[in-house]
């Protein structure tokens, strides 16, 4: 029977048999017992599926990965210990020293640093393109050694909406997959695979967990990218892996499973960015109400954005659902149900006024976090970006007056009342 996404949030990933626990069991065990060495050997050869060591795979984590896989409409998925690990694996699984990757400029700062600093040290080159570039500009960024294209559905914190079809078309024309970080909208509001993305990543730390309890990540494979048709570009998937008993992943596991099997067998084995089963359990609790929470996050953010837009002490508001927003048309196409709970805006009077506004908030807490049930906000100019001058702040796209507000799931009028009283005091 067909399950709609709300049902999948609650039920997918784990179906207990007669007399088994109703809630997913936390398998808090590093290792698993076998009757014979032969039985275990089959697991090592990837001839039988099963568990042997929780650095590579754990049943609790796999149940939760299976739920996220169902939500995104993928064919295989894995959890990682953080969103950073998920994005690192998604690229490093197919790009090695000497290779090249194209990424949107409008991405999370942590991902930008991972690509632009750390992965460059590993010998992987990146070209950053404006998400609003023309098809010609995008096509011109490809090189013979390009292995992937990367972008975020809604960028954190710029809130740009990516034209996923434009990026997918260019990637596929050059025989490489499109990787999309879908953290902000979650599969409730957008499923990038349906628009042509091949691999989807998440920082589950944000809305999926939703309660600020556990850092985590996830990678989902859409199962549509034909590695074997581009075998010369992806030797890691299409030729035998000597470090794993001579397996050719794309042959043995097909389009549907090769990417995740390789990332598990090689990258999890060697890097061990594994989530704890307890964290996966907490993530699953969050997923059970994801569809209910996202609706409220989006409704609250829209109400807050409209109240801000009408306020004389607010100089500008950035929220894709506002008709005045540059990305309103793309939002209507890709995210018709809503975007996320994050709104950014400028307080008239600049940096000092923004700081005074923040100090006077009573409900909204000052945090670097976003996407939590509790409303929080950040003034980058006096916190994360405090070392920059006014000119540098403007160049980085974080002007001194910018406040980023992550609307939680409280009562919308209470959030607006808090903002109004704090704006009254900001001068
Ligand atoms: C937070 C975030 C990340 C990094 O995730 P962590 O779980 O903090 O490692 C990656 N991408 C986006 C869009 C994020 O918001």
Image: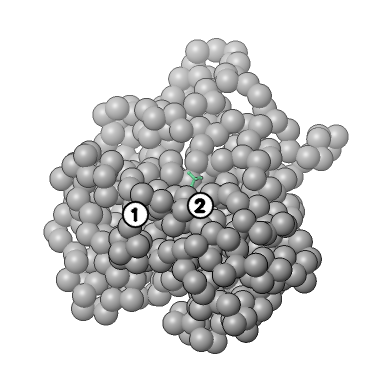
Return the residue nearer the eye: 26 or 248.
Answer: 26
Badge 2 or badge 1: first in the primary sequence: 2
Looking at the figure, which quarter contains the C terminus? Answer: bottom right
Q: Which residue is drawn at the image coordinates 60% and 51% (left, top)?
A: 366
- Label 1, secondary structure: give it: loop
- Under 8 Å from ligand 1: the CB of mark 2? yes
Point out residue 198 in the picture as x, y percentages from the top left corner: 41, 60
Point out residue 287 in the picture as x, y percentages from the top left corner: 68, 51
Point out residue 319 in the picture as x, y percentages from the top left corner: 54, 74
Crowd around label 1: few <14 · some 14–19 · many ≥20 (10 Å): some
Q: Is residue 341 left or right of residue 49?
A: right
Q: Nearer the viewer, mark 2 or mark 1?
A: 1
Q: Which mark is residue 306?
A: none
Q: Which mark is residue 202?
A: 2
Q: Which residue is drawn at the image coordinates 21% and 78% (left, top)?
A: 136
Task: Name the residue beneath numbered marker 1.
Answer: 388
- Label 2, secondary structure: give it: strand
Q: Is residue 299 left or right of residue 118?
A: right
């Amino acid at each position: 029977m067909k399950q709609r996404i709300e049902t999948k949030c609650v039920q997918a990933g784990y179906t207990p048999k007669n007399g088994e626990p109703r809630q997913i069991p936390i398998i808090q065990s590093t290792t698993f017992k076998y009757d014979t060495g032969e039985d275990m050997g089959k697991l090592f050869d990837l001839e039988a599926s099963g568990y042997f060591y929780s650095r590579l795979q754990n049943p609790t984590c796999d149940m939760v990965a299976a739920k996220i896989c169902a939500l995104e409409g993928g064919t295989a998925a894995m959890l990682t210990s953080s969103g950073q690990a998920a994005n690192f694996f998604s690229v490093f699984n197919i790009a090695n020293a000497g290779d090249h990757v194209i990424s949107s400029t409008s991405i999370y700062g942590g991902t930008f640093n991972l690509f632009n600093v750390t992965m460059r040290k590993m010998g992987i080159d990146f070209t950053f393109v404006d998400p609003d570039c023309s098809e010609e500009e995008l096509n011109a960024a490809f090189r013979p050694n390009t292995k992937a294209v990367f972008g975020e559905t809604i960028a954190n914190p710029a809130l740009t909406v990516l034209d996923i079809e434009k990026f997918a078309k260019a990637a596929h024309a050059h025989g490489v997959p499109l990787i999309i970080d879908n953290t902000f909208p979650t599969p409730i509001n957008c499923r990038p695979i349906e628009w042509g993305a091949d691999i989807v990543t998440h920082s589950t730390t944000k809305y999926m967990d939703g309660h600020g309890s556990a850092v985590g990540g996830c990678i989902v494979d859409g199962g549509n990218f034909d590695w074997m048709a581009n075998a010369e570009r992806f030797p890691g998937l299409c030729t035998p892996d000597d470090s794993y008993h001579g397996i050719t992943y794309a042959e043995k596991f097909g389009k549907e499973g090769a990417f995740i099997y390789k990332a598990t067998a090689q990258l999890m084995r060697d890097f061990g960015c594994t989530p704890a089963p307890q964290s996966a359990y907490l993530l699953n609790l969050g997923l059970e109400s994801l569809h209910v929470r996202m609706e409220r996050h989006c409704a609250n953010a829209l109400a807050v954005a409209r109240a801000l837009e009408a306020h004389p002490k607010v100089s500008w508001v950035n929220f894709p659902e506002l008709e005045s927003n540059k990305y309103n048309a793309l939002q209507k196409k890709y995210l018709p149900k809503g975007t996320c709970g994050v709104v950014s805006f400028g307080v008239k009077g600049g940096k000092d006024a923004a700081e005074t506004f923040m100090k006077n908030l009573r409900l909204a807490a000052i945090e670097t976090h976003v996407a939590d049930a509790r409303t929080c906000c950040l003034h980058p100019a006096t916190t994360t970006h405090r070392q920059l001058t006014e000119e540098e702040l403007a160049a980085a796209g974080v002007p001194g007056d910018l406040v980023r507000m992550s609307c939680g799931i409280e009562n919308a009028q209470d959030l607006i009342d808090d903002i109004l009283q704090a704006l009254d005091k900001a001068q």
